[in-house]
Image (cartoon, coloured by chain):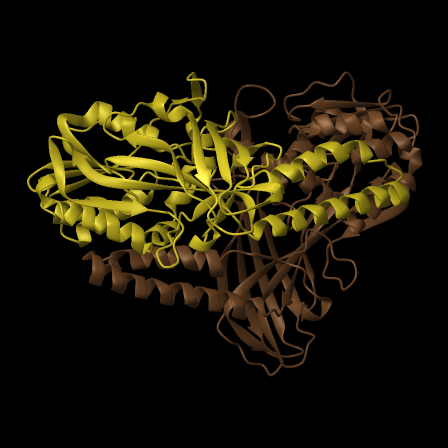
Chain colours: A brown, B yellow
């Protein structure tokens, strides 16, 4: 970690929230983002996600017509799994691109599975490598928490625009982002942690003044902001139980992977409705998750449509979990209450791979009551 | 995090283990190293370390003659605490340099303590800033785990060579690195964790072959190396109890802060002896720690010499703890056994702020027996 970036020598351009080009230092991007993917332990975590594995496996093997004798590009191949499956499903040629040193392991894995005559593992950034030809299929597992964290889809779009044949298909073909009102004890935990940190701070300020003659009280305001951001304003990874979803879920974004532009995913804006379905409950905030679909394209559909969903599930949780956006304080809610929810998501200025989200919520109670509207900004770190 | 580095626009040169110059990308250095220091929570942790605070406080206020009417440079001022104390001890002028955004808070703190006429807070890297004059005192809290982790002393040396008057003093003036044989249950914990990770791996390889038709066994070797490095070859932070030190401690490095060069701290080599003092015990490895002293210089000594020690202590633990280097398997040892210990420390090639250590150990048992010698490489991450 800390080495100069992978792939190409120079800096790359990434797209910022206002559509401008920001120079992304490859080395910094590596230190901040790519480096985790160089670890086998991390790859194994993703390879051990049975829901993820089953969906991609079935998407490929139940739709061999898309692979048999065709050319495939795997964007961000990691260990090489999708490239290997594509080859096993009969692809003529598979280009497997990986920006981290993991590509060396992918190459070994391809060889150990006797597929080196089909699969070319290429080390480098998608934006920097050159393929010998365009491809029939682009397959990629690019989804981050709540779909867009990590902003890897930019690289898939780039690959598609440059390397996919006009008749080519995307695997997955579609993606959707969902939100729903939730309850969660995290709201109490985090408030507890925050209050503990603040209590500790005030003791600290006292002691520093008493024993060391320095008045640190001027730092209380920035310290408070820092702790509020960390404990109360940062979305939480969680594996929600379906029981914790207390109202109807709504789609805040739909993506057609064949036609989406970076502009389309730069910012997400939606106004959605939700009804509370649980009696006498606590609206603690919103859960966010995604699903992706493997449908092919209109003129060349999959025979078996596959859905990979990361919705709250008792038995089919994934390593993505959900992102939980908590409101302080939580509010009482009742079955029949109607929510008007505004949703806005942008990339962080400091790091285009991180996100900022704003939730607004107006409640019309089933009793007719109109509590004050809520609005809050969150950080997806 | 992820923003282009602080201080200056270009890259800096850092010194590698073989004495060569390596270009350090400021942005990468920030993403990997500096960024933690921009958080008030982290500053508070260090400011809450009573041993650290007491030692620096006493070093300054019991030696006011070094500060009264003098000019001072605080290298890496963080929150500004040392600069503020220096001013309170009567300094005429204090330059407080800080590379992260924390400098803004330091500036506020100086103002809130009515010292802005004395303390100039300067935001930037020590290597990049210009002071209006040379100084009588350089004060800095630069010590990382086991003294040299973070390699911050390079910046103190740079500051000294450029900004310290020929008659100036260094606070601290001296530093020492110590090692001693130790016992620790960590050795069982980490081996457990490692074995658990490996058991899990083999199940994973089986399942991936059974359910997904891909043979991952070729990755067993690199996975094993990765887990061994993580669980068994990386030094552990720990707050050792003195009872866990089972033999005499020895100094592996002594530094005179007034005269040390980067070359002197680039690599550390020592051969030391130790005697086991505990009856019928388990030699699990070595603990490493440091102390620093405030003695002034020969021609201008402190009136009260202060020592800041991070040796294992029941009551005076510090946030530095100790670094524990564990051997697998641990070996039986008895009171009177003699150890011949070789110690070698170098900077990591990938990241000059991290370290690699090699311990060699030959035991001559009190019974006269000569078990096979041990040698092992460790990573200080």
Residue nearer the viewer, B242 or A52? B242
Residue nearer the viewer, A84 or A246? A84
Q: Is residue B172 shown left or right of residue B91?
A: right
How many circles with numbers are drawn on the protein? 0
Is residue B241 in view from this perspective? no
Residue B350 in the image, given as x and y percentages of width and height: 52, 27
Residue B55 in the image, given as x and y percentages of width and height: 25, 49
Is residue A173 in view from this perspective? yes
The image quadrant where one finds the N terminus of chain A is: top right
**Residue at far bottom of view:** A367
Residue B222 in the image, given as x and y percentages of width and height: 71, 32
Which residue is depicted at the point 29% across and 25% down?
B260
**Residue at far front of view:** B367
Which residue is depicted at the point 67% across and 80% down?
A279
Which residue is depicted at the point 17% across and 36% down?
B296
Q: Is residue A24 shown left or right of residue B260?
A: right
Please determine whether, in this image, residue B260 is positioned above or below residue A82: above
């Amino acid at each position: 970690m800390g080495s100069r970036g992978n792939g190409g020598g120079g800096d790359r351009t990434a797209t910022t929230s206002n559509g401008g080009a920001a120079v992304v230092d490859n080395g910094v991007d590596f230190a901040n983002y790519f480096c985790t993917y160089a670890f086998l332990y991390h790859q194994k975590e993703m390879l051990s996600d049975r829901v993820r594995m089953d969906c991609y496996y079935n998407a490929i093997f139940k739709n061999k017509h898309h692979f048999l004798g065709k050319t495939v590009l795997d964007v961000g191949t990691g260990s090489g799994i999708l490239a290997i499956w594509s080859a096993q499903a009969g692809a003529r040629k598979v280009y497997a691109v990986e920006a981290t040193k993991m590509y060396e392991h992918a190459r070994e894995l391809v060889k150990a599975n006797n597929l080196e005559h089909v699969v070319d593992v290429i080390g480098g950034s998608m934006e920097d490598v050159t393929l010998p030809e365009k491809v029939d299929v682009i397959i990629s597992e690019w989804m981050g928490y709540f779909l867009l964290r990590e902003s890897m889809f930019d690289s898939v779009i780039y690959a598609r625009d440059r390397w996919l044949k006009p008749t080519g298909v995307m695997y997955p073909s579609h993606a959707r982002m969902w939100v729903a009102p939730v309850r969660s004890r995290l709201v109490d935990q985090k408030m507890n942690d925050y209050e503990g940190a603040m209590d500790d701070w005030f003791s600290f300020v006292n002691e520093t003044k008493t024993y060391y003659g320095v008045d640190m009280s001027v730092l209380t305001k920035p310290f408070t902001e820092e702790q509020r951001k960390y404990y109360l304003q940062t979305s939480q990874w969680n594996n929600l139980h379906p029981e914790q979803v207390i109202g109807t879920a709504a789609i805040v974004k739909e993506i057609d992977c064949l036609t989406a532009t970076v502009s389309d995913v730069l910012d997400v804006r939606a106004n959605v409705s939700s009804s509370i379905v649980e009696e006498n409950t606590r609206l603690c905030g919103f859960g966010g998750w995604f699903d992706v679909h493997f449908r092919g394209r209109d003129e060349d559909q999959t025979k078996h449509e596959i859905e990979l969903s990361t919705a709250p599930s008792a038995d089919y949780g994934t390593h993505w979990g959900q992102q939980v956006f908590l409101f302080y304080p939580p509010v009482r809610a009742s079955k029949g209450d109607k929510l008007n929810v505004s949703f806005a998501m942008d990339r962080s200025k400091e790091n285009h791979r991180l996100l900022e989200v704003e939730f607004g919520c107006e409640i019309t109670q089933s009793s007719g009551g109109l509590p004050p509207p809520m609005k809050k900004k969150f950080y997806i770190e």
